[in-house]
Amino acid sequence: MTMTNATEARDIIRAKALSSVKRRENLSRLYTATVALALVVAIIPLTSIISDLVGKGGQFLSWGFLTQNVHTPGFNDPHNVGGIANAISGSLIIVGLAVLISVPVAILLAMAIHEFNNRIMKTVAVIVEVFVGLPSVVFGVFAFIALVVTTKHFLAYYGSLALCFIMVPVSTVNSVAALRAVPATLNEAGLALGSKPSRVMFRVIFPTALPRIMTGIFLALSRTVGETAPVLFVTGSSALVSWNLNKGATTLPAAIWNNLQQGSPYAALECWGIALVLILFVFFFNILGRIFLARAEKK
Amino acid sequence: MSDAMTSTNPKLRLVDTTVLFNGRAAVKNVSFDIEANKVTALIGPSGSGKTTLLRSINRLHELTRHATLTGRIELDGVNIYGNEIPLTVLRTRIGMVFQRPNPFPTMTVAENVVSGLRFIGIKDKKFLDEAVERALTQAALWDAVKDRLSAAAGTLSGGEQQRLCVARALAVEPEVLLMDEPTASLDPISTKQIEDLMVTLREFTTVVIVTHNMQQAMRISDNCAFLLMDDDRAGQLIEYNETDKIFNNPKDPRTVDYIAGRFG
Amino acid sequence: MSTNTSPEITTNATGQGRKSLTGGDGAYRGLLSTIVVLVLAVVVVFVFKLAQQAIPGFKLAGWGIFGGTWNFGAGQYGVLPLVAGTLVTTTLALLFALPVGLGTALAITYLIPQRLRLVVTSIVELLAVVPSIVYGIWGLLTIYPWLNTTLFPHLVSWSGGAWPFNGTYVGQGIFLGAIVLAIMVLPIIIAVSRDVIAAVPKELTEGALSLGATRSQVIRKVVLPSCRSGIVGATSLAAGRALGETIALATLLGGITTTSPWPDRLFATGSTLSAEIAIEIGGITGPPGKVLFSLAFILMVIVGGATYAGRVIVRNAQKKFQ
C-alpha cells in the first residue's frame, strides 16, 4: 500500500487549507447572516403586536372607556360609545378569587412535595406537571360539566374555580423549585437544633424561598388574567359592572372574544382597545414578578 | 534582561509582545525566539501570564472580548498578526492541546482525529484513513485504539483521550504544537506516557509547552522561558535559556528563587 | 436563569427526602396530607367526570367517530379531520419555529454583544407573555388581510397554482394558524435552545477553533451535534404547547367547511381538537354537545401523554452535561 508520507501530506494539507479559505469564510458569513435573519424574524412579531396595540388600541384608552359598561345595542348617544368597565370588574373578581384559592393550595402542595419524597408524592409531582401542559379548554369543559350542568347556572365564581386548574399547577411547580433552591444546610441546621420540621419550614425555608415563590405567583397571575377558554364555558356574561361572584360576569379576554363574534369592523377595532388594557394588566404582573426575581437573586 | 538566545532561523519569534485585556496588560514586552524541532517550556508561578502568552501564539486569546496585542509574533519570519496568513490557516500550522482532554463527544475516535482535515475540506477517504493511522502512531495511541476506531471518543480513558487530542492536533501536520499544561488533569501513568510522547514529537514538529511542574520541564524540554508577574500584575520574561542552564545555572535571582521553590 | 424554561419537579429531589414526618409534628403532617388528598381527589373527579361525560358523546358518534367527515351542525362526528388539523398545524408551526428559534438562540449566544443581550432576551420573553386571545386578534386583524391581499396571491402566481398552493383561499386557515402558532412557541424553543447551547463546554468550541475551523463550522459540526437531544426536548415542549393551544387557533383556522373538509393544502381551512370545542361552544348545551365532551377527553389523554414524554426527554438531555 503506497502511503503518502508525512511531508507530502503536509503539502497537500497546506495547499487545501489555503485554497478553501475563501469558500469557508464565505460560508461562515452566510451562516452568520442567516442566524441574524432568524433573530430579526423573531423580533418582528412582537414589534408588530405592540405597534398594533398602541396604534390601534391606544385611541380607546380614556376614562370613559374604563368606567362605562359595554355599549348597549340601539343606544344612540354619541357620548356613550361603550366601555369595558364590566369586563374589568369581572376580571378583577374572577381572577381575584382564583388567586385567593390557588396561592395557599399551591404553596402547601409544594411544601408537601418538598417534604415527602415517597412514591406517592413523586406521582403527585408528575400529575402536577401534566396539568401544567393541558389545554385550557379541557378545564373549561370540566368546569362546565361539573358546575354548570349540575346547577344550571352560569356564575362568576365557576370561572374562578376553572382558573384554579391553571394557576395551581403552574404555581406549584414554581414554588417547589423555589423551596428546592434554599440551601439544604439551612434545613439541616434547623433540625440539628432540635426544631420540628414545621418550624424549620415556616421560620426558615419558606421565608427564604418567599421572593421566588412570589415571582412564580405573579407570573402565573399574568398568565391567568389572559386566559379565555376556562372562563368562556362557565361564567356567562354581564353587561354591567358587578362585584357579585354569584352572578354572571365577563372577563377582559371574554369581552374580546365576544367582540370578535360580533363581526363588525368597529367591534374588531375595539378589540385592540380591550387587548391593550388586558396587556397592561399582564405586563404589570409580569414586571412585578421580575422585580421579585431580581430581588431574590440578589440575596 | 534575559540572555536571549537568538537563533538564525527561529521557528517562532516573539518581539516585544504585550497582551492586553480591557487595556490591562497580562503579559508585557516578551521577546524571545523559539527554535524549530525543540521543546520549549514556559514556566513560572500561577498568574505569570504563561497561558495567555501561549494562547496568543495561535491567536486564541482573541476569543476574549477587548483583547489586544502589541508587538509582533512571527512564524518563519511572517507576522502572524498581519494579513499574510489567514486565521484558519494559521491554526492548522500552529496546533493546540488543552489542559483537560476535549475530544468531540459526538464523534468517533477516527472522526475526531481527522476533524481538522475535514474542516479544511479534505474528503478523500484514502487520505483520511492514512492520516488516522499516521497521527495516532505519532501520538503513541495507534496500538491501543486501532480496533476501536469507530468507538465514541468518550469511551477512552483520560490518558487515551488526551493522546487522542494530540493525534487530532497532529493530523493537520502543524509546524508548531502548543500544549497548555497537558498532563495537569492526568494520573501519573498517563502523564509519563504523554511526557515520553512529547520528547518524540520533536521529530515532526516544534513544541511549546506551559507547565507548572518544574520536574516535568526539566525532564522534557530543551529550552525554558521563566515568566513572573511584576508589580502591575503583568507577566514579564525574566530569563530564557537552555533548560540545563536555567535549572543548574540560573542568572536572575528571581529565577533562583523560583527554582529553589520559594515561589510557585 | 430564566424562570420557567422547562418547569419540572420530578427529577432527583433535593428536598428533605423523608418518607414521613416524625416527632410531634402531627399538625403539620396532617395539614400537608390533607391538601394532597384534596388535590388528588379533585384530579380523580376530573378524570372520572370527563371520562363519564365523554361516553354519551362516543355513543352518539358511534363508529363514525373514526370517520373522515366532521360536520358538527349536520351530525357527522368523524374526528379524523380534527386530528389531521391538529397534527398539520402543529407540524407546520414547528417547521417554521425550529429554524427561527434555533437561529435566534445562536444569535443571542454568539452574535449579540453582551450589553444588548438583556434587551433582546427581554423582547423574546415578552412574546411568551402575550395571551393567546391577543395572538388571535393580531393574527385575524393584521396578518390575515396581508395574507389575503399580498402573500397568497403572490404564492399562487409564483407556483402557478401547484400544490400546496392550490385551491381557493380565504386567508383564514391552517397557514395562518400555523404561522401564529409558530410565533407562540418560539420563546420556548429559544429559551431551551439557549440553555442547551450554553451548556456546551467552552473547551469544545476552543478545541475546534484551534484546529482551524470557521465559526460556522464550530457551530454546525461541534455545538449543534452536542445539542441534539436538548433540541429534541425543546421541540417536544413546543409541540406540547402547540397541541394545547385553543383560543388563538379558534379565531384563525376558519373551521372545517365543505370546500375544505381536510387540511390537504396550505390554503385549506380547518380545525383542531381544542379549537373545535371553543368554536362550537354555542352548541354545548344541545344534544350534540356531548361530542364536545368526548373531544375534551381525547385531548386530555393525548396532550397529557405528550407532555409527559417531553419532560422525560429534556431531563435526559440535561443530565448529559452534568
Image (cartoon, coloured by chain):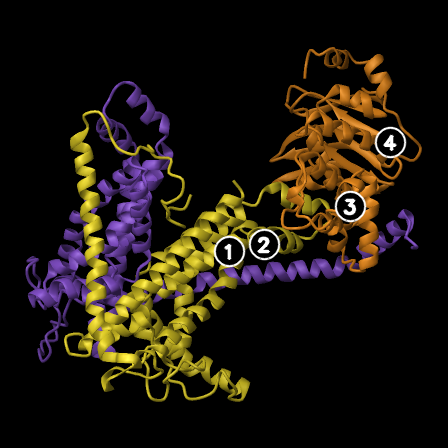
Chain colours: A purple, B orange, C yellow
Q: Earlier in the sequence, mark 2 or mark 1?
A: 2
CA distance for labels 4 and 1: 46 Å
Of the pair B200 and C176, the residue shown nearer to us: B200
Q: Is label 3 in a helix, a strand or a loop?
A: loop
Of the pair A103 and C184, the residue shown nearer to us: A103
Q: Quadrant of residue C184?
A: bottom left
Q: Residue B165, percent across and down? A: 72, 41
CA distance for labels 4 and 2: 38 Å
> Where the C terminus of chain B falls, by quadrant?
top right
User: Which label number is shown at residue C35?
Assistant: none
- The residue singled out by tag 1 in the image is C231
Q: Hey, what amino acid is under mark 1?
A: Ile
Tell me which chain the residue with mark 2 is part of.
C
Q: Is residue C195 left or right of residue A266?
A: right
Instruction: From this view, report whether residue C312 is shown above or below residue A65.
Output: above
Q: Is residue C319 left or right of residue B108?
A: left
Q: Quadrant of residue B189?
A: top right
CA distance for labels 3 and 1: 33 Å
The residue positioned 6% from the left and 62% from the top of the image is A247
Q: Hey, what amino acid is under mark 2?
A: Leu
Q: Hey, what amino acid is under mark 4?
A: Lys
User: Which label number is shown at residue B38?
Assistant: 4
Q: Are marks 4 and 1 on the same chain?
A: no
Instruction: From this view, report whether residue A264 is shown above or below residue A118.
Output: below
Q: Residue A138, percent across and down? A: 25, 64
Answer whether labels 2 and 1 touch (C-beta < 8 Å): yes
